Amino acid sequence: VLNQVDQTGRQEAVLGGSLSFPDGNLIISHPNTGLNILGAVEAGSVTIVTQNLDAQASAQLMDGEGANFMNAAPGSRLNILGGKVSATSGDVVLGGPAILIGGGDDGGSEILAPAGSVRIFGGESFRLLPEGGSAGSVRIERLPGSVNGNVLNSQEIRAGQMVEITGETGISNSGLLQADQLGGIVMMRVDEGGVLINEGGALISADIIIPFPLPGPGAALNPDRGDAPSSLSTGLSRIPVVSSPGQSKSSRRVVLRESAPVTGSASSQRQRANQARKDSGERDDAVAGNPSRGTGHLARGRSFFGTRGGSKAKKR
């Protein structure tokens, strides 16, 4: 069942109540001006966009095919302000020239897809690929055109399988991005020259974390050096099992792939500068697990991922 709600007009629209279709596929499109979600939206699968969705695209979605979402107006941003958007069995898809997931007067926002994935696109046009691909498959395919789209999250985004965020020029996260299931993925992509920012206090929790575009040859991150792991502008970083502050242990392993600029906390930036001065031979010893280096904390300050790791043994 597909329930499509089209809203038109010159003023920004506000959804302050609730829409619920627990067993259906709900599509909300508002192609002219901004849309503000203050209430609750729930369905089997949920799609909320401010791009244009024509009759052909609607039919394609009903048949389970891919569909194009086109030509978002620069001012038609999508704001989730204290609202809750949840998919009970499938994916949550959000699209607009700019996506803001922030708090409201009555509390914070939540984007939830416990059995599926959360897909977010900040930009002019995109193609949504069919649902039901293999685990970890992307569904957002960026189409030509640009409105300098971006995604800003300060709240909670939780999915079972994958959190996929694409922004034309930037993605900024100061909240929670979490993929719960085994092999869960958090993927963030920006255009060449775009910026990925993870603010201090943010948390990304997944087995695999992949910023795009894909990097060149990799570099191993030394887990026993200074305040915090640094943000690398290129390469493949394998960060050992880490735990959040106040937790005794964690079962997560993080793989970071990136080549777009990434900005962490001031501590991580300072650490990056310090590490650049270190001897490369010392790094090789640490990566090889040289027993003479001891078992100090991975991060005594806050890392790019807002986590701390390592044992509680005192550093020698």
Image: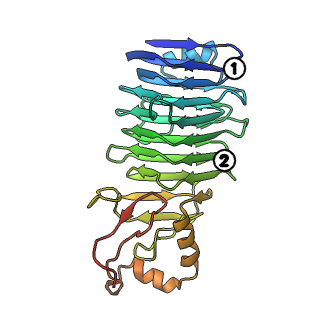
Q: Circle 1 is placed at which residue position?
A: 32
How far from the left and from the top, in percent, is residue 83? 47, 28
Residue depth check, mark 2 versus mark 1: number of the one nearer the observer: 1
Rendered residue at 67%/45% (across/down): 169
Q: Label 2, label 1: how many angstroms apart (C-alpha)?
A: 25 Å
Question: Are the residues flagged by discs 2 and 1 in contact, CB closer than 8 Å?
Answer: no
Q: Nearer the viewer, residue 242 or 91?
A: 242
Earlier in the chain: of badge 2 and badge 1, it is 1
Q: Circle 2 is placed at which residue position?
A: 191
Q: Is residue 4 above or below residue 120?
A: above
| Residue at the front extreme, as displayed | 105
Residue count near mark 1 (Cα–Cα under 10 Å), binned few <14, some 14–19, many ≥20: many
Q: Quadrant of residue 35?
A: top right
Q: Nearer the viewer, residue 107 or 235?
A: 107
State how the image is colored.
rainbow
Q: Amino acid at mark 2?
A: Asp
How far from the left and from the top, in percent, is residue 208? 42, 52
Q: Callout 2: helix, strand or loop?
A: loop
Q: Quadrant of residue 231?
A: bottom right
How far from the left and from the top, in percent, is residue 146? 73, 37
Q: Is residue 173 left or right of residue 178?
A: right
Q: Amino acid at mark 1?
A: Asn
Q: Nearer the viewer, residue 244 or 194?
A: 244
Q: Quadrant of residue 112?
A: top left
Which image quarter is the C terminus in?
bottom left
Mark yes or no: residue 63 visible. no
Rendered residue at 49%/16% (across/down): 62
